[in-house]
Image (cartoon, rainbow, N blue to C red):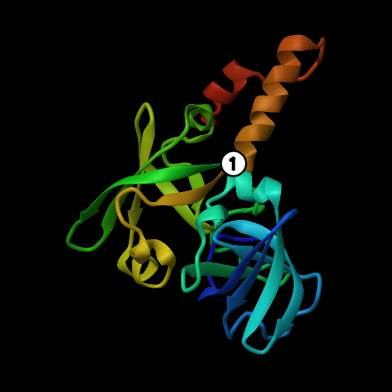
Amino acid sequence: MFTGIVEEVGYVKAYNSASNGAVLVVACRKITEDMHIGDSICINGVCETVVDFDKESFSVNISNETLNVTNFSSLKSGDRLNLERALTLQSRLGGHIVSGHIDCVAQLVSVEKLDDYYNLEFKFPHEAGKYIVYKGSIAINGISLTVCEVYDDSFKVAIIPHTYKNTVLKDLSVGSFVNIETDILGRYVEKMLSLNNNVDTDSRINIEFLQENGFV
């Protein structure tokens, strides 16, 4: 599990396609401290497992499934990457619970620079819309952010200068694709409502209960 708080921005040192996926070598310095084989690392929002490392880089094997559901298939040498080590019991949960399991990719459609922050608008696939809610949490390339506006097929997030300058967000241009992980809580709510609609149960949790208590 992760928090969506980026620890370091690394870059693609090498990217080699293979019959069963790809091998990605990431150049970095900070997160290799206390690194071990088998550690989970969040790379642009994707949870990957360290298979090799030294003081200045680490390697992961990327499956075909990951290539199909993320923007990893378009990576090239020199691309910058948001990096975060797995959450520990002693860590501060400064963002929100991020699993590193990507739901979809979204496309940047506009960037608005205001006095003290940036508004970024992303277009999402239709099937992801039910999990994106106003003031809800969302992870974009592994960054924990809050949705500030939602439309039929897009949403906006407000980015403070620190986040914009210290993550890969500043590398994006209109048309860029990003990895999206919606809040896992929405999926649990969906499952519970589905069970209540199809199975006899004594549970008091239903859509009316959630509305009355401010959850939806």
Residue 82 or residue 24, whichever sits in front: 24
User: Crowding at label 1, few (<14), some or many (≥20) Cα neighbours within 10 Å?
Assistant: some
User: Above or below — where is 36 with respect to 5?
Assistant: below
Q: Residue at x 43, y 42 (%)?
A: 135
Q: Residue at x 57, y 57 (%)?
A: 45
Q: Is residue 54 shown to the viewer in this render?
A: yes
For label 1, the SS is loop
Q: Is residue 216 shown to the viewer in this render?
A: no
Image position, residue 180 (x, y; %): 52, 47
Residue 79 or residue 170, whichever sits in front: 79
User: Above or below — where is 112 with respect to 38?
Assistant: above
Q: Image quarter for residue 103?
A: top right
Would residue 207 be found to the left or right of residue 178 on screen? right
Specify the amino acid type for callout 1.
Asp
User: Above or below — where is 5 with respect to 100?
Assistant: below
Which residue sits furthest bottom?
55
Which residue sits furthest front?
19
Task: Please identify the quadrant where the N terminus is shown.
Answer: bottom right
* Residue linked to disc 1: 103
User: Above or below — where is 125 with respect to 177?
Assistant: above
